[in-house]
Image: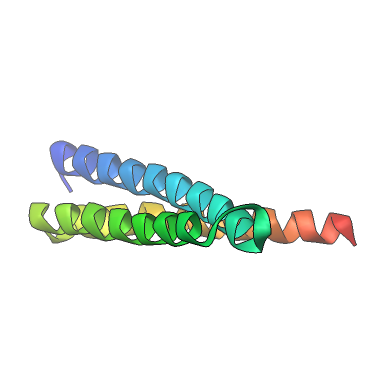
Amino acid sequence: MTGPMLARALTCAGFGAALAVAYFSALGWNVRLYAGHGSAWTSMLVHLTRLLAIGVAFALCARQGAAPLLSSVAGFQIMRTAAVKLQIRALERQS
């Protein structure tokens, strides 16, 4: 892999990681809204916006090519794994 290709892949992976942080932050907000701290319409709006945003972001990456899409998905999955592990540790500390 050449230098510019590697830089582009790392940039897309960083974009995927930032996308995951935003996605899981919105998911946390969405859970609190569904749990009774918000209206049903607000909950549904946040839910649909979150799903639409992730779909549009990955579609834009796909328009750039396979490598940017795969790199951004990889960055997203790395952050997803980290978020799940952090949540499991938090739950273990509570019990």
Q: Nearer the viewer, residue 5 or 78?
A: 78
Figure quadrant of residue 59 = bottom left
The residue shown at (22%, 55%) is: 56
- Visual colour scheme: rainbow
The residue shown at (24%, 52%) is: 57
Q: Nearer the viewer, residue 43 or 62?
A: 43
Q: How many marks?
A: 0
Q: Nearer the viewer, residue 30 or 12?
A: 30
Measuring from the top left, give residue 83's x and y in whole percent: 58, 54
Figure quadrant of residue 44 = bottom left
Left-right relation of 76 to 87: left
Measuring from the top left, give residue 63's x and y in whole percent: 9, 56
Measuring from the top left, give residue 70's x and y in whole percent: 25, 60
Q: Quadrant of the C terminus?
A: bottom right
Left-right relation of 62 to 46: left
The residue shown at (86%, 55%) is: 93
Measuring from the top left, give residue 89's x and y in whole percent: 76, 56
The residue shown at (32%, 43%) is: 15
Figure quadrant of residue 52 = bottom left
